[in-house]
Image (cartoon, helix red, strand yellow):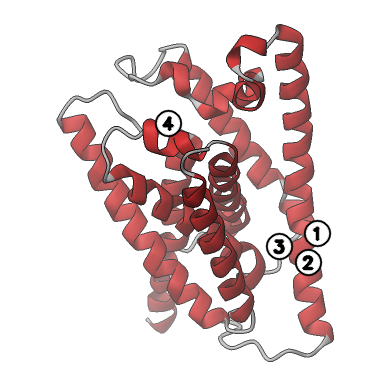
Amino acid sequence: MKYWWLAALIVAVFAAETYIVWLMRNNRKACMITLFAISSVLLVYKTVEFAYYRFARKGLYPVEFSHITYFLLGVTVCLGIKKMRAFAGICSVLAGFGYIVASCFSPDSIITEASAPFYIPLAIIQHEVLWFAGCLLLFNVDKYSLKDIWVPLVGIAAMIVFSILVSQRIIYKDFVGYDNMIIIKIITGRIVEYLIGAENVTLVKQAITATVLIIAAVGIFVSFYFVNNFAFNKREKKNSEIKGKDFEIGLLYLIRKKKART
């Protein structure tokens, strides 16, 4: 691996962000403000970026898992949709962690597959930010109920259906990345190409990989809820003083607050 140092740098930043999340665990207000700032910037930046692609007719749309996650995180936090926080957090963590794992397996591809040099630091920063924001949402903001797991499961199902519609050219017919959609590669098992090489992939290996990944995804979603509950139960047991325990931010919250005053 020629660019092993890049993978090491990405992992180091990942570790530093995780430590910062742990340091902020008892300051919910700071977490919410940080999340709002991050989400606002990502939402505006990604909206402008894809609007430009559309205007320039480059055939690029927000169809990848990480692309969808940028908007999901931005809309959820900026509007203050509580029911969607767990879903946005899980997707952000998975997108960020997936990029980190991919960089460890194939750091050279980060350099060679970039369409321009300035996209390299942008991609790294954006995915690292997703990891950071996702961890804040999952472990420092709210205690989520397992009975609401249907929200992220339905959300992921909607992402898969959307991706299939795109891959079959039913929508976004001028999209230029049909053959490189990560969600399609996961549900078809083609993601195994990254691990053993495209020339060694068989239909059986693809089917096994897809099955394992789907089962693992459901298990990961459930485990996030248990880890979230464990973290909050532990703080409650220790009688930890949470700063800004009831602090909320977001457009819907501000609207409700304004109505309550009138």
Residue, far left: 56
Q: Which residue is mark 2?
A: 229
The answer to whether mark 2 and mark 3 are in CB contact below 8 A is: yes
| Front-lying residue, 250 or 132 | 132
Q: Which residue is mark 4?
A: 63
Q: Report the Cα–Cα distance between label 2 and label 4.
A: 32 Å
Quarter of the picture holding the C terminus: bottom left
The answer to whether mark 4 and mark 1 are in CB contact below 8 A is: no
Which badge, 2 or 3, is on the more N-terminal residue? 3
Of circles 4 and 3, the one toward us is: 4
Q: Secondary structure at mark 4?
A: loop
Left or right side of 88 for 213:
right
Q: Residue at x 43, y 77 (%)?
A: 257
Where 159 sits versus 208, above or below?
below
Q: Report the Cα–Cα distance between label 4 and label 1.
A: 30 Å
The disc at residue 184 is none
Is residue 69 visible from the viewing direction of this image? yes
Q: Which residue is mark 3?
A: 144
Few, some or many C-alpha atoms within 10 Å of disc 3 (few <14, some 14-19, many ≥20)? Answer: many
The answer to whether mark 3 and mark 1 are in CB contact below 8 A is: no
Few, some or many C-alpha atoms within 10 Å of disc 1 (few <14, some 14-19, many ≥20)? Answer: some
The answer to whether mark 1 and mark 2 are in CB contact below 8 A is: yes
